Amino acid sequence: MGIGVSLFLLALGAILTWAVEFDVAGLNIDTIGVILMVIGAIGLLLSMLFWSSFAPFRREERTVVRDREIV
């Protein structure tokens, strides 16, 4: 799951939790919204964690020492 999908799930969950005033028999829209927000937050956290571990600026620099040829 990428950052975009995680943000989409967070937004959709927030909309379902706080903006929708619709009742469905046998379904609690608020609970579904909270579940989507939790899944989106976990996905965002994991995406950021893996994204930072593969970032090019975190590479360790190595010093390479080569012997010179004696002519």
Image (spheres, rainbow, N blue to C red):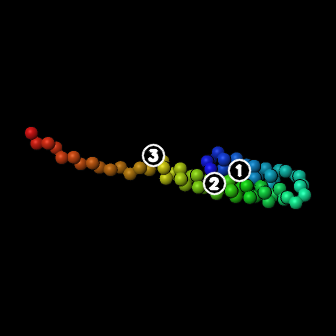
* Outermost front residue: 26
Query: Label 2 belongs to which residue?
Result: 43
Q: Amino acid at mark 1?
A: Leu
The mark found on residue 9 in the picture is 1
Residue 40, x across and y down, in percent:
68, 53
Q: CA distance from mark 1 to mark 3?
A: 28 Å
Which quadrant is the C terminus positioned in? top left
| Callout 1 touching callout 2 (CB < 8 Å) | yes
Mark toward the start of the polypeptide (2 vs 3): 2
Q: CA distance from mark 1 to mark 2?
A: 9 Å
Q: Residues within 10 Å of mark 3 (few under 14, many from 20)?
A: few
Count of labels in the image? 3
Mark toward the start of the polypeptide (1 vs 2): 1
Residue 36, x across and y down, in percent:
73, 55
Query: Label 3 belongs to which residue?
Result: 56
Q: Secondary structure at mark 3?
A: helix
Q: Secondary structure at mark 1?
A: helix
Q: Residue at x 41, y 49 (%)?
A: 59
